[in-house]
Image: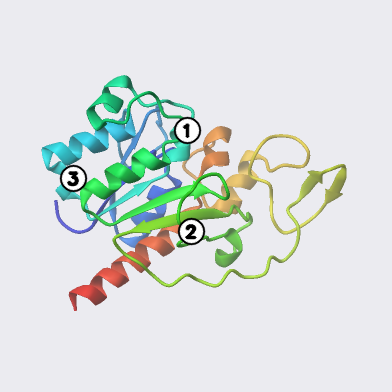
């Protein structure tokens, strides 16, 4: 393999993957669910089992960077075999800690993503759609391992998210890309707002990371890497 390659774990429908692709990476994804709309090379399976396999076999060295979004499998406990092999014991509904453990074992730079306020990760980057002129806010937190970049300024929001909330209907420049009813975004509106055209599955769109986020992150990573090499 040549060039820069990112391993996209808990890949969902490929929002993060597309951003890395646009930044110049080749992408391999892995998710426990069937993702026929995923736009790049894809493996169906337990993401942490697959990562452990890559580490122990040495095949992890094919990659330049690892991205992981554990919430995409948050409802799926790790298999007993994975728990025993890693010495964690029991089952895990919170996959952040075991994901970080394996990411650290790779020896590679990594990016770990979580929805805002849902898990204990470092908020090294916290982009929102307004930073990129998108039609959603979709705040996300990213922990960076073995590399760093300057945190961009969070711009002031231009208004409300459109829809009903606590009995009040508001109009605004952003759509609610989650749930159904109450003025929330339709599938075409979510596609347009996030820049995602390759899937029209409602559940996948409500979970997706806008590609603009990881395009920015991937570009920042390659810039930082080049500065170190120089």
Dot label at residue 74: 1
- 29 vs 80: above or below: below
Q: Where is mark 3, residue-wise?
A: 60
Percent coordinates x, y for residue 140 in the rendering: 53, 53
Query: Is tag 3's residue or tag 2's residue first in the polypeptide sequence?
Result: 3
Residue drawn 40% across the image and 25% down it: 91
Which residue is the extreme one toward the bottom? Answer: 230
Which SS class for mark 1? loop
Q: Residues within 10 Å of mark 3 (few under 14, many from 20)?
A: some
Front residue (pair 150, 176): 150
The answer to whether residue 45 is seen in the rendering is yes
Disc nearest the viewer among 1 and 3: 1
Residue at 29% across, 67% down: 222
Q: CA distance from mark 1 to mark 3?
A: 23 Å
Q: Residue reaching furthest right?
A: 167
Q: Which x, y percent locates residue 153? A: 55, 72
* Mark 2 lies on residue: 123
């Amino acid at each position: 393999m040549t060039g820069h390659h990112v391993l996209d774990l808990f890949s969902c429908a490929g929002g993060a993957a597309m951003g890395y692709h646009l930044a110049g990476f080749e992408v391999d994804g892995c998710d426990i669910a069937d993702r026929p709309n995923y736009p790049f090379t894809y493996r169906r399976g337990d993401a942490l089992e697959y990562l452990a396999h890559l580490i122990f076999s040495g095949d992890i060295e094919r990659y330049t960077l690892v991205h992981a979004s554990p919430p995409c499998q948050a409802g799926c406990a790790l298999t007993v075999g994975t728990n025993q092999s890693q010495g964690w014991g029991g089952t895990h509904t919170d996959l952040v800690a075991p994901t970080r453990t394996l990411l650290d074992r790779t020896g590679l730079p990594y990016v770990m993503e979580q929805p805002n306020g849902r898990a204990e990760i470092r908020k090294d980057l916290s982009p929102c759609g307004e930073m990129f002129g998108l039609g959603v806010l979709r705040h996300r937190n990213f922990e960076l391992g073995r590399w760093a970049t300057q945190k961009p300024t969070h711009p002031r929001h231009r208004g409300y998210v459109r829809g009903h909330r606590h009995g009040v209907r508001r109009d605004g420049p952003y759509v609610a890309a989650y749930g159904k009813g109450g003025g929330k975004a339709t599938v075409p509106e979510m596609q347009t707002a996030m820049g995602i055209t390759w899937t029209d599955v409602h559940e996948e769109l409500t979970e997706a990371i806008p590609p603009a986020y990881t395009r920015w992150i991937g570009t920042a990573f390659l810039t930082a890497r080049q500065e170190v090499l120089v």
